[in-house]
Image (spheres, grey):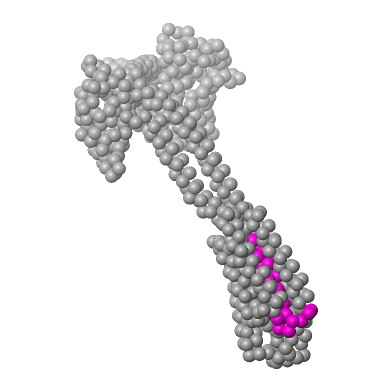
Amino acid sequence: MFKNISNQTKILVPAIILSIVLIVIAFIIIQPKFNNLSTLTSLKERITYSNTISSLLTSIQKERGLSYVYLTNYNKEFQKRLLQQRKETDLKIKELIFYKRDSKDISLKNHILENIKYLNNITNYRELVDKKDISKDLILKKYTQLTNYLLKEIKSSINYSNIPNINKNLISFSNFLDIQENLGLMRAIGSSIIINKSYSKNDFIQFISYQSLFLAYENSAILTSRKLFIDKYNNIKKSDEYKKFRTMMRDIIDDRSDKLNSLEWFNITSETITQLQSLISYIKFDTQSMIDIENKNIKNVFLLISNLTIVCLISFIFMIIAFLTLAKSEQKLREVTDKYIISSITDTSGKIIDASQAFCDISGYTKEELLGKSHRIVRHPDMPAEVFRDLWSKISNGYPWSGKVKNLTKDGGFYWVYAHIEPLYNNKGEIDSFISIRLDITESELLHEKVVEEEAKNKLNQELMQQQSRLAQMGEMISMIAHQWRQPLSAITATTGALETRATLNKLDNQMVLNSTKRIKDVAQHLSSTIDDFRNFFKQDKEKVVTDFSKVIDSVYSIIESTLSQKNIELNIIKNSTISLYTYEGELKQVLLNLIKNAEDALIENNIENPKIDVIINENQLIVKDNAGGIPPYIMDKIFDPYFSTKLKKDGTGLGLYMSKTIIEEHCRGKLIVSNDKDGAKFVILLPTE
């Protein structure tokens, strides 16, 4: 279904979907924050509006109290203060009108317009008071309806937010407004009671009722308000005005109003209300500050998320560009891989379901000829069946297989590959195909075959050279045998001649015969021992044994000592210290004999006076040196080359030192080092101790 979809589309579609998801997530996160921002901005304006109404409410509450007191006994002082208070109330109403003009909230403007219309009733109330055409209780009721309307307007205009601390402030704001309203009512009724010096049943009930409400709202404010506001209210309660207010309130309740002054009560209560109004204003400013902080936090979050969204979108754009570039590179890589990597995919039965162009090129088949065919189409008959049984056993059980495979081309030729095959799995974890990656190793395999062939030839040549070296050494050994046998054979000949002469002359006696036969037996025993020494020397032992240099030297010395003595060559054997060695003892004897013979030949050819050869043992080192003058520097690098000889005689093969170095370094894993000492050549055999 998705095979014909381009790589670019496969990348772009998920990237676009991811971008859309990111934008939606950002919108989901930002939307509530944005709503909160709008709500808090509206709330801040409404709190300002509520504060304006609260200020108007305080003024009307005071006007209500003065009107109530004035209607009690028409006191001129209260009348004067009433007229002044009406002016303050009118100013507050004008402030409300100005607020309506400046407000941008249409809904709030409508509310203000309704409030102003309702406030027009105050003009009628004033006319009734001035005409004394209304009772004090009725005017109290009328004004209280007006204040209750304003209180309700204040509370309804405040939209509660989802921020607990701001809501707690708003609750505190409402509670202290209720306290203020009841203080205003107590101020009016208390003044009337004090003026009359006694109170009617109705006044008392009203005063007690408003006092109870005042205390209830005070208790509610303390329970539900923030500690900061409670502390400020407690400070108000500690003030002299509040203490005086509480004292006078108890006097009124206890029927001691005759001792009180109505104007003082009115003023003290007003001072308490003013302090309370300051607290209400403080709550308003604190709430607005909290709203400002919250708005700032929301704006920061909004800005952060917006910036992150922009950064993410830019990143996605760059990612898409990078992915498109990568897709192009991947496509190019696929083309290169298809062209140069020998690969194929088969199903679980071994049928080819995909093949690279490189596979087609090396096998000679087209892709159409390979698809649907078994891999046996390229199987070469030289490959053992066991290899493929092992291959299928492993990959069928989920294991990879690697190895060399010889394949058959379409034209009947062959090629070698190093193959690595691994199973591929579907979404259910089941093997559904196999992928094979191959490396063409035809040239290396052909080269390897040639190397093996050359190694076999070299090995044969080396064995021939070793045989030639051994034959040359055997020739020298035969010469040494002949030399060592001359004297014993002469002794046997002389003894048998003497016996023959005495027998001819009939002068044989038993003792002489016994002595002569004993001498002949001793000489024969010596000859037999010499044969054993030579036979052991050339014994074909190809196993390592535990030996040491001292044992090797003793064996060689028994063979060569006679020859060196005849030629007046001094052989010095110095055994400083020796250790056990695990090596080829027979081959080591051949090397030592060759080195001593070379030294002997050099001493004879150079006519050295007082010729000598030193053989020195130092643990795992064996040193052979002479005083024949040394090896010329210009041939020092050639002496170990095969068939290179410095001997003046024509019987030198040039294989002795070559084979000696081969034996020590390749067979025995040691070192054979040559140098010139002050008197002559110095050869050092260094063998490993393990």
Q: Looking at the image, is 193 positioned above or below residue 611?
A: below
Q: Nearer the viewer, residue 519 or 94?
A: 94
Q: Locate residue 589, reporting x and y percent.
A: 41, 26
Q: Quadrant of residue 162?
A: bottom right
Q: Which residues are magenta?
A: 48-77
300 horizontally vs 601: left or right: right
Q: Is residue 49 magenta?
A: yes
For the point 45% across and 42% down, the residue is: 20
The residue nearer to you, when weighing 358 against 30, is: 30
> Magenta part mainly helix, strand or loop?
helix
- Taking the image as shown, residue 661 lies to the left or right of residue 214, namely left
In the rendered image, which quarter is residue 420 located in? top left
Q: In the rendered view of the protein, which quadrant contains the C terminus?
A: top left
Residue at 57% from the left image edge and 19% from the top image edge: 676
Residue closer to the observer: 456 or 629: 456
At a point 45% along the width and 18% down the height, the residue shown is 657
Residue plotted at (45% across, 32% down): 323
- The quadrant in which the N terminus is found is top left
User: From the viewer's perspective, is residue 482 above or below residue 194?
Assistant: above
Residue 4 seen in the current view: yes
663 relative position to 374: left or right: right
| Image coordinates for residue 458, horizontal then vertical, percent | 36, 17
* Above or below, 640 relative to 238: above
Residue 479 inside the magenta-drawn segment: no
